[in-house]
Image: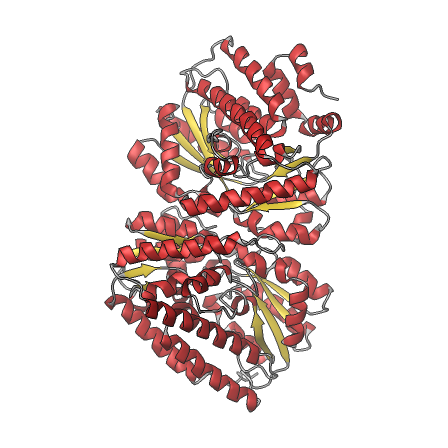
């Protein structure tokens, strides 16, 4: 059994601990579930305020498929024009590969998730499947509606766990999660350096592990990591500084492939990266409204207009000294693809930063992607 | 085998004339909104304020029927609108980016504003957001919630929608410079309700044997409750069609001469192969029922005494009874009991199920529906893979093979 964070403290440095957990996430979860005695709720997409799950005494994690297993059973229910990431999740649900997950939250988000929520319940009526309405609009009416949806989710979670979500428990959860977002941002800030102390692959693992861990434990680990990174030996200046934009990047090989060109991924606009923690939740407001306001800023394309996404990306490009943006977009993710023509022209035209596009799927062949990225990096660096 | 006689509706001629006039009006009336069909109160609200509405979705169907979508989709793809995007969207951007000047029905004039709801399709929001950026015009949205479970929606859904309608009306008033009068609101809500009633009436009449309307008849008529929503003309056209169909039922006149099989059609048909219904007619197959004609529009009788609430309920009423408000309701929400009721009521004995590359929403769940129809209801089912507008994703030979096998199954080989 893998050591959990308390043992990590004494046995190894933070990055080693992160690597070890990332290597076998299932083992961490089994251990956590057994020792903490909490039920695990997996949520799809960064737009779900996990604070309400945490406040109900449950353990929220993000819902991803394990990498490398061909999709087979899911094709009986989901046609091939649906998100391959979600198809892989459904496939692994059918195969019983989520033994540590006690329930899921599916938000109104991409088409597949939104429209298969009922399908999930229809196929597996005994599964605990909660849903959450998410707004594209950001008006007061939309924020109020979203806060009521969050309240409904909190009630559902409280009913499931047997622990009512109170204003106090929610405020406590917001504090823990705000701290987590703050620490992850500090880790990301280190990548602004001319020679960043962490690679894109390491940042990816840090994120994936943070999606899995208990947030207080993760906060300790991130604090330790930040201490250690201060003393990390300087790395060589990268050949190019890339930003990656896309939905759920769950296969770390994609980042590895990008960095094998000599470039470094220094920033991202992905569901598995900055979109998950860039927002803050005001601890001084009514907690439900504060969550609605905070999470309405999560820049997932299904809930964000293209020009707001451009503002987000352009701030990041400027702060992180990005000199090339790679759109790595899942083949059937329409909201990402819908924004691409506008973003491509805006990033190239207004920021003068070159853009390239690679199409990804749950299982994708890295060789053509590598060729594309090598050529792109070559074109940037001359 | 000789081709079966085509029994077109006489009232269809008036609908065709209205369609031609409608496309002329687009060039003459301002302000002009581009909008979406669906169960969309914004179209009624635009009518209240004298805003003409054009529908790029309908126009994509027109282009597809004239075999021009392929051209427009290709143009859009050259501008990085990827082939996986809905073909209606690619058709729309291809039309906008086409340097040529010849377009079906003269094309669509540029809009003064964009409006959309999100009940039928999540992509509406992104598509019209992209159009907003393309034209740099105001964008009015009613952001309908999606009912993702069988639970009864809470009361705040209606409160939220009423406010959405009020906010949208205020925006439309500002853009148009016109004010919504109580009288006009009342009239429009009434016409909207009447149209839904006549539409439901037509669907009800189609339970008769032989079915008075085939899928293609309903697909032509659907122009009325969508594009002429909330108008007196729309009510008159549907009333006329309803009367004619009643006569057909009374006199046992079917949409096809020799009806032997009654099939369900699931999904949006390939508009560039509308001749498919003729192929089925040759084998004695009629389509009295389909999810596209039954569930995709407002098919509920919604009280119109308070026009704003009527519009709010209409935005939520996409689908069946109660708050449907999304295709989610029409798929798994209808997979067992409702499907059983419909199969019984429409005396269905087979199904054509389409996987539509463009409409992931209408396609999510159809595989399970096909399984249920086959295994639980014992129906012969054929599953086709066909895009709604992009002909490049339609293989005649493959479709023919599957249909041959299907006709064999139902004894029409």
**At 61% from the left edge and 53% from the top edge, which residue is drawn?**
B149
Q: Where in the figure is residue A184, as x and y percent of width and height?
A: 51, 23
Q: Quadrant of residue B90?
A: bottom left
The quarter of the image holding the N terminus of chain B is bottom right
Q: Where in the figure is residue B21, as x and y percent of width and height?
A: 31, 74
The quarter of the image holding the C terminus of chain B is bottom right
**At 62% from the left edge and 42% from the top edge, which residue is drawn?**
A155
Q: Nearer the viewer, residue A291 or B328?
A: A291
Query: In the picture shown, does residue A22 fall above or below A60?
Result: above
User: How many labels, in total?
Assistant: 0
Query: In the picture shown, does residue B189 fall above or below B169?
Result: below
Asked whether the viewer can see residue A158, the reply is yes
Q: Nearer the viewer, residue B186 or B132?
A: B186
**Can you name the residue that lies furthest to the bottom here?**
B251
Q: Quadrant of residue A382?
A: top left
Q: Where in the figure is residue A201, as x and y percent of width and height?
A: 53, 24
Q: How is the image coloured?
A: secondary structure
Asked whether the viewer can see residue A251, the reply is no
Query: From the viewer's perspective, is B74 left or right of B292?
Result: left
Query: From the viewer's perspective, is A272 left or right of B413?
Result: left
Q: Nearer the viewer, residue B25 or B97?
A: B25
Q: Quadrant of residue B52?
A: bottom left
Query: In the picture shown, does residue B276 fall above or below A311?
Result: below
Q: Nearer the viewer, residue A298 or B385?
A: A298
Query: From the viewer's perspective, is B378 left or right of B153?
Result: right
Q: Where in the figure is residue B298, as x and y percent of width and height?
A: 49, 67
């Amino acid at each position: 059994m893998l050591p959990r964070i308390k043992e990590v403290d004494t046995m190894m440095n933070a990055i080693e601990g992160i690597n070890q957990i990332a290597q076998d996430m299932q083992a961490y979860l089994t251990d956590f579930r057994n020792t903490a005695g909490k039920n695990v709720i997996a949520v799809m997409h960064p737009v779900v305020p996990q604070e309400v799950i945490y406040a109900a005494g449950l353990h929220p994690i993000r819902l991803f498929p394990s990498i490398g297993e061909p999709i087979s059973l899911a094709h009986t229910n989901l046609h091939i024009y649906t998100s391959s990431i979600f198809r892989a999740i459904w496939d692994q649900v059918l195969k019983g590969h989520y033994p540590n997950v006690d329930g899921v939250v599916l938000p109104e988000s991409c088409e597949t998730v939104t429209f298969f929520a009922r399908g999930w319940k229809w196929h597996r009526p005994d599964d605990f499947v909660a849903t959450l309405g998410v707004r594209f609009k950001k008006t007061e009416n939309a924020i109020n509606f979203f806060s009521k949806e969050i309240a409904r989710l909190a009630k559902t979670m409280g009913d499931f766990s047997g622990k009512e979500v109170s204003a106090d428990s929610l405020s406590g959860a917001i504090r823990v999660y705000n701290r987590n977002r703050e620490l992850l941002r500090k880790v990301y800030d280190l990548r602004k350096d001319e020679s960043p102390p962490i690679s894109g692959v390491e940042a990816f693992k840090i994120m994936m592990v943070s999606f899995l861990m208990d947030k207080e434990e993760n906060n300790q680990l991130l604090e330790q990591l930040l201490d250690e990174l201060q003393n990390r030996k300087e790395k060589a200046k990268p050949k190019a500084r890339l930003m990656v934009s896309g939905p759920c990047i769950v296969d770390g090989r994609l980042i590895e492939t990008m960095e094998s060109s000599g470039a470094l991924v220094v920033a991202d606009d992905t569901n598995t990266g900055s979109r998950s923690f860039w927002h803050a939740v005001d601890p001084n407001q009514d907690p439900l409204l504060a969550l609605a306001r905070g999470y309405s800023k999560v820049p997932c394309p299904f809930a964000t207009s293209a020009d707001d996404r451009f503002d987000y990306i352009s701030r990041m490009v400027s702060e992180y000294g990005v000199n090339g943006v790679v759109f790595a977009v899942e083949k059937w993710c329409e909201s990402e693809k819908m924004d691409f023509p506008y973003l491509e022209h805006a990033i190239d035209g207004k920021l003068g930063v070159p853009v390239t596009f690679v199409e990804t799927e749950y299982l994708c062949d890295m060789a053509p992607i590598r060729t594309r990225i090598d050529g792109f990096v070559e074109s940037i660096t001359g | 085998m000789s081709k079966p006689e085509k029994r077109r509706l006489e009232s269809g001629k008036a609908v065709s004339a209205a369609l031609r006039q409608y496309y002329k009006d687009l060039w003459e009336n301002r302000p002009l909104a581009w909008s979406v069909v669906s169960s969309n109160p914004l179209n009624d609200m635009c009518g209240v304020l004298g805003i003409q509405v054009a529908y790029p979705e309908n126009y994509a169907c027109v282009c597809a029927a004239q075999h021009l979508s392929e051209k427009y989709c290709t143009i859009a793809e050259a501008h990085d609108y990827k082939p996986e995007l809905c073909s209606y969207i690619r058709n729309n951007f291809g039309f906008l980016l086409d340097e040529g000047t010849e377009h079906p029905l003269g094309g669509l004039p540029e809009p003064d504003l964009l409006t959309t709801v999100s009940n039928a399709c999540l992509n509406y929001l992104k598509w019209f957001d992209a159009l907003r950026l393309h034209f740099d015009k105001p964008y009015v949205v009613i952001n309908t919630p999606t009912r993702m479970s069988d639970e009864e929606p809470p009361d705040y859904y209606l409160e939220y929608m009423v406010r959405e309608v009020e906010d949208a009306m205020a925006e439309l008033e500002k853009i148009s410079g016109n004010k919504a009068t109580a009288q006009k609101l009342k009239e429009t809500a009434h016409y909207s309700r009447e149209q839904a009633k006549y539409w439901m009436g037509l669907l009800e009449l189609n339970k008769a044997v032989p079915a008075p309307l085939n899928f293609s008849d309903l697909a032509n008529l659907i122009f009325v409750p969508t594009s002429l929503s909330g108008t007196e003309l729309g009510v008159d056209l549907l009333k006329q069609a309803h009367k004619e169909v009643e006569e057909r039922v009374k006199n046992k006149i079917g949409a096809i001469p020799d009806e032997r099989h009654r099939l369900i059609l699931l999904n949006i048909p390939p508009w560039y192969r509308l001749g498919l219904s003729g192929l089925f007619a040759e084998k004695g197959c009629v389509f009295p029922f389909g999810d596209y004609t039954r569930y995709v529009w407002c098919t509920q009788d919604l009280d119109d005494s308070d026009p704003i609430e009527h519009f709010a309920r209409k935005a939520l009423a996409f689908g069946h009874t109660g708050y449907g408000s999304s295709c989610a309701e029409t798929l798994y929400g209808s997979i067992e009991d409702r499907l059983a009721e419909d199969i019984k009521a429409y005396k269905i004995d087979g199904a054509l199920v389409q996987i539509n590359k463009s409409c992931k929403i209408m396609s999510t769940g159809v595989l399970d529906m096909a399984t249920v129809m086959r295994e639980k209801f014992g129906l012969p089912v054929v599953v086709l893979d066909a895009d709604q507008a992009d002909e490049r994703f339609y293989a005649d030979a493959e479709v023919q093979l599957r249909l041959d096998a299907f006709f064999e199954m139902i004894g029409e080989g």
